[in-house]
């Protein structure tokens, strides 16, 4: 088994990653269920403005998004996963309100969404979106989350 590293960091927000370490076993399980292993996975929590600049610079898109996933793996056929995932906390909050979902559920969905991209799932077409949502729901069913975020205990199930 390779050495595996999962990082959580904050780019430009007053937000602490305390509690997010508890997501590591869940992320490992998602990868393992797809017969893959995490070699290096970095989640960067940021604002809309920060992610918008990345969206413009690297994807030439001038629109807000909740997540951007960069696959850093060298071989597509490799069983090892390596990636950088940027999540806009502003978008997650707005989407949770718009979708009438608890914030933590939407946050976990987006965290899983990024990993699912590294596992090969796409979401450009309606059929791909349907498949991605199904996979996200399967991931959420695996996770009972009790997180301690910004001095608040947040429970999801």
Image: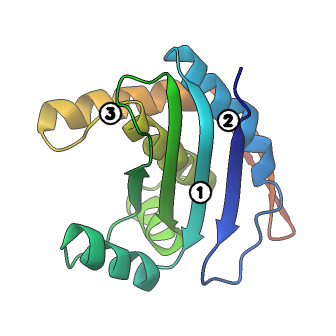
**Disc 1 crowd, CA 10 A, few/some/many (<14, 14-19, 20+):** many
- Label 2: which residue? 157
Which quadrant would residue 152 be assigned to in this image?
bottom right
Q: Residue furthest front?
A: 74
Say which of 91 and 21 sits in front: 21
The quarter in which the N terminus is drawn is top right
Residue 83 drawn above or below residue 78: below
- Please name the residue shown 66% across and 29% down the image: 28
Residue 2 drawn above or below residue 106: above
- Please name the residue shown 16% across and 44% down the image: 124
- Label 3: which residue? 132
- Label 1: which residue? 43
Q: Secondary structure at mark 1?
A: strand
Asked whether residue 113 appears in the rendered view, the answer is yes
Residue 32 drawn above or below residue 97: above
Whole-percent x, y for residue 145 in the image: 73, 40
Residue 35 drawn above or below residue 148: above
- Please name the residue shown 49% across and 56% down the image: 85
From mark 3 to mark 1, how far is it between C-alphas? 19 Å
From mark 2 to mark 1, how far is it between C-alphas? 22 Å
Q: Are marks 3 and 1 in contact (CB under 8 Å)?
A: no
Q: How is the image coloured?
A: rainbow
Q: Mark 2 or mark 1: which is in front?
A: 1
Q: Mark 3 or mark 2: which is in front?
A: 3
The quarter in which the C terminus is drawn is top right
Asked whether residue 143 appears in the rendered view, the answer is no
């Amino acid at each position: 088994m390779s050495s595996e590293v999962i990082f959580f960091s904050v780019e430009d927000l007053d937000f602490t990653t305390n509690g997010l370490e508890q997501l590591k076993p869940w992320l490992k399980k998602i990868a393992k269920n797809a017969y893959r292993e995490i070699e290096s996975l970095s989640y960067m929590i940021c604002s809309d403005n920060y992610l918008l600049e990345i969206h413009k610079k690297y994807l030439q898109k001038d629109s807000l998004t909740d997540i951007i996933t960069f696959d850093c793996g060298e071989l597509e056929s490799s069983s090892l996963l390596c990636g950088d995932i940027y999540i806009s906390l502003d978008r997650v909050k707005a989407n949770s309100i718009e979708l009438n979902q608890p914030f933590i559920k939407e946050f976990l969905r987006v965290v899983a969404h990024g990993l699912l991209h590294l596992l090969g799932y796409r979401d450009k077409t309606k059929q791909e979106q349907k498949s991605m949502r199904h996979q996200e729901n399967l991931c959420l069913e695996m996770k009972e989350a009790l997180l301690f975020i910004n001095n608040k205990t947040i429970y999801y199930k």
